[in-house]
Image: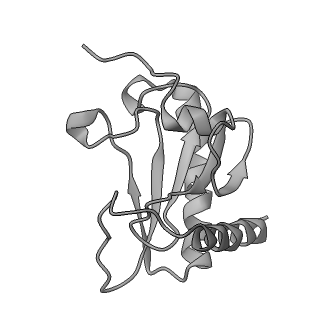
Amino acid sequence: MTASYDVDNIFAKILRGEIPCHKVFEDDNAIVFMDVMPQSTGHTLIVPKAPSRNLLDADAGVLSAIIPLIQRVAIAAKSAFGADGITFMQFNEGAGGQTVFHLHFHVIPRFEGEALKSHGRGMEEPGVLAANAEKLKAALAALD
């Protein structure tokens, strides 16, 4: 049996403005912000505004609206951070590695010869996150 959606998960609180984030982009469908525990420089989260635990219970319309945004953020992140590649991550349920039970996608810039850092190892400095958010905002604007 799948658990129900928790309206008090951390991403729901970010969406309601109860918890701050280093926002990169927001529209009617989603918010994009820097991961506070990045596995690589420029690690970004894309969080749909529609409530769902994960991909398994998400509305197909939400998914079709989010995928082009994920692609756009990935293209901008590769450029902004001079990355050699991009890793996408999306986890479903605890056994699948999910720790925040609101659908979200990780966009992680990758660099040749650099392993990913462990997630949850500690918080990044707010100034670094703010600077990375500004770099990514500029790269997204350049795509327009």
At 66% across and 68% down in the image, what residue appears?
130
Which residue occupies the foreground of this view, 129 or 24?
129
In the displayed image of the protein, which residue is found farthest to the top?
1
Which residue occupies the foreground of this view, 144 or 9?
9
Residue 53 placement (x, y as % from top left): 42, 27
Residue 85 placement (x, y as % from top left): 43, 74
At 41% across and 57% down in the image, what residue appears?
88
Which image quarter is the N terminus in?
top left
Which residue occupies the foreground of this view, 53 or 99?
99
Above/below status of 34 relative to 80: above
Quadrant of residue 40 in the image? bottom left
Above/below status of 122 relative to 135: above
In the displayed image of the protein, which residue is found farthest to the left?
95
Residue 39 is left or right of residue 118, and the answer is right
Residue 55 placement (x, y as % from top left): 41, 33
At 45% across and 54% down in the image, what residue appears?
106
Which image quarter is the C terminus in?
bottom right
Residue 48 is left or right of residue 5, and the answer is right
In the displayed image of the protein, which residue is found farthest to the bottom?
113
Residue 69 placement (x, y as % from top left): 62, 50
At 60% across and 54% down in the image, what residue appears?
33
